[in-house]
Structures are given as C-alpha cells and as structure tokens.
Image (cartoon, rainbow, N blue to C red):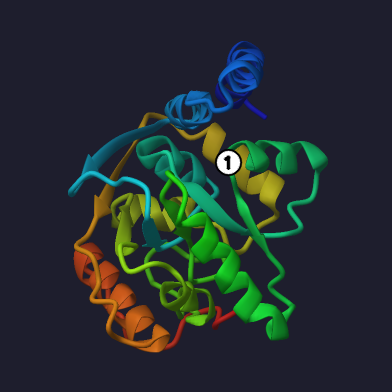
Amino acid sequence: MNARAALRIAGLFLLFGVMGPIHVVTKVIFGRSQWPRRFLATAAWIAGARIQLKGAAVSGHTLLVSNHVSWLDILVIGGATGCAFVSKDDLGHGFIHWLADQIATVYVKRTHVKGAKDQAIAIAAALEGDKPVALFPEGTTGPGAQLLPFRSTLLEAAHFASRDVAIRPVALDYGTAAAKEIGWWQEPGKDNVLRLLRRRGTLPVTVHILDPLDRAGDRKQLTREAREAIAARLGLTSEGPSPIGATK
C-alpha cells in the first residue's frame, strides 16, 4: 500500500465516522435519511471519481439497467441517483451487508434458479417505493472494454411491476483506456481495491441515463434492447463472445 491509497482509506473511514452516526440518528427520528447517497457520492470523490450525470432526472418507479465495470460503479451510480441496488445475498462481511441495507438493497440468490419469479416479484415490489432500483444484468464485473452477456431473468420484474414503472438503460462511461485499467475480472478483490486507490490523478466518469425502453416486449427483448443501447452509447459492439463468458 502506498501513501496515496493510505490517505484515501483514511478519508473513507473518517467519512463514515462523520456521516454514519448522523445517518443513524436521522433515520431514527425521521424514518428516512438522505445521508447514504451523500456518503456514496463523497466516497466516490475520495476514491478519485469525478462524476457527470447526463440524461433526464431519475425518480422512483424506475428500473436502472447498467453495465458493470468495477466496485466503483456502486459508489458512482448510488451517489448520482440515490438508487437502491439488486445484489447477491452473500456479500461476505457483515459490515458490508449493513452498508447495503442502508440503501434498501434487494437481495437475490443467484443459484436459486427456481426462485427467479420470486426474485422478480421482490424487485417489482421495491420499484413501488420512492427510490429507483439498479441492477447489473451482466451478473459480474468485466474487463471494461467489452460488455458481457446480459442475463434476462431479473428483468422479468418489468412484468410484475405497475405500468408506471420505467426501465432505463444506464451507460457507465469511464473512457476506453480507464475502463480497461479499472476493470475487475482477473485479480482478487483486495488487490483491485488497493490498485484503484493508489491510482494517480482523478477518474472522470459519465453516467448516461438513457431513454426508457418500451415495456411491451418480453424480458429477453428488453434485455437485448438495453444491451444494445448501452453498447451504442459506449461505442462498443454488442455482439461477439465475451473473453470470460457469461459467468465468472
């Protein structure tokens, strides 16, 4: 670990030490809190990300379907939109689970194939709330310069959600060179985190909120259209095999 990474880690701990208690007290008194979004946005800034949001404003009753490059994506999208996330149910350390709970994360069992309908219903229920919900249909992070196959299962939520729920693709654009550098797919998580935190300079990232999809299609059509829209915005091909396949 170099000095830059150490300073950023210290900054993240200090940020949590300040915002964490304020969030807990605010939630107890008012029943809700905007501090998790502020925490994610500030944590992204400390990690070097400089976020620009493009596209129409996002509100509740919106399913965000995004490409997935890095663990930074959570900080970037969460800080920019205040969304909840769809995540695997096993996040490892209990503290990580607690943090995920604070942004109303919807947990799913990826290995529970027969429970896909229940998972979609759970996501649809979350979409009835006042927060947009984001999912990563690639199911994992990738090499950055190429989209992985999109899984259609969780987009079945569109058919269980009320008709006023919008489905909007989100293109996370770090730039081609930076995306290749930060893409997380061939190294342990700890190594990737430290490598990004010791990175020199800042990391510009644009969050493109794209036009809503037509919900008339089935989940496979919606998945295909989302992938094509994201690929077009990023200047990537949406065809061809992934270097690591559909799973990691």
Rendering quarter of residue 31:
top right
Residue indicated by mark 1? 195
Image quadrant where one finds the C terminus: bottom right
Question: Where does residue 169 sit, x and y in percent of width and height?
Answer: 31, 64
In the foreground, 115 or 161: 161
Residue 243 at x, y percent in the picture: 50, 79
Q: Nearer the viewer, residue 114 or 53?
A: 114
Of helix, strand and loop, which one carries label 1?
A: helix
From the viewer's perspective, is 111 left or right of 116?
Answer: right
Residue 5 x %, y %: 59, 27
Looking at the image, can residue 44 be seen?
yes
Q: Quadrant of the N terminus?
A: top right
Q: Residue at x 66, y 36 (%)?
A: 99
Looking at the rendering, which quadrant does residue 86 occupy?
bottom right
Q: Quadrant of residue 109?
A: bottom right
Q: Nearer the viewer, residue 106 or 146?
A: 106
Q: Please tell me whether residue 172 is drawn above or below residue 167 in the rendered image.
A: above
With respect to residue 114, does 81 lie above or below? above
Question: Quick check: can you spot residue 248?
Answer: no
Q: Measured from the top left, where is residue 183 in percent x and y?
A: 49, 57
Mark 1 surroundings within 10 Å by alpha-carbon count, few (fewer than 14), some (14 through 19), many (20 or more): some
Q: The residue under label 1 is which amino acid type? A: Arg
Left or right: 124 in relation to 173? right
How many numbered circles are shown? Answer: 1
Q: In this view of the protein, which residue sits in the foreground, 43 or 97?
A: 97
User: Which residue occupies 37% across, 48% down?
Assistant: 60
Judge left or right: residue 192 versus residue 112: left
Residue at 68% over, 73% down = 110
| In-image side of 157 versus 235 (left or right) | right
